[in-house]
Image (cartoon, grey):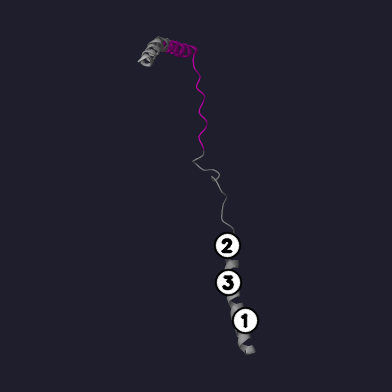
Amino acid sequence: MDVSKIIAEIDTQIASLQTARAAIVSLNAAGPVKGKRGRPKGSTNAPKAAKKKRNLTPEGRKRIADAMKRRWAAQRKETPKKEAAKKEAVKK
């Protein structure tokens, strides 16, 4: 192989590598990606303030307790009927 041909090929490869290097350097010169991750400072869509905890008044608490007692009493009245129905179903 001729030495001048080898040198010519090396020169073309060097030229292509230099253009690739210049392209990479120009990308890096633009700097890294702008900004940081997450919500930007001063954003108008900031999270809402936590809602104030709702307190139950003593009257409201008593009303709920009375309603639950009535509900439990009604359930106690229904259970003997259900048990009797189950016993009859087992007997058959």
In the rendered image, residue 68, in percent from the top left (x then y), is placed at 44, 13
Q: Nearer the viewer, residue 92 or 22?
A: 92
The kind of residue on which mark 2 rests is Ala
Residues in magenta?
47-72
Q: Nearer the viewer, mark 1 or mark 2?
A: 1
Residue 71 is one of the magenta-drawn residues: yes
Vertical relation: 31 (above or below) 21: above
Quarter the C terminus occupies: top left
Q: Earlier in the sequence, mark 2 or mark 3?
A: 3
Residue 20 tag number? 3
Q: Earlier in the sequence, mark 1 or mark 3?
A: 1
Contact flag, marks 1 and 3 (Cβ < 8 Å): no
Dot 3 falls on a residue whose secondary structure is helix
- Outermost residue toward the right? 3
Contact flag, marks 2 and 3 (Cβ < 8 Å): no
The kind of residue on which mark 1 rests is Ile
Residue 54 tag number? none
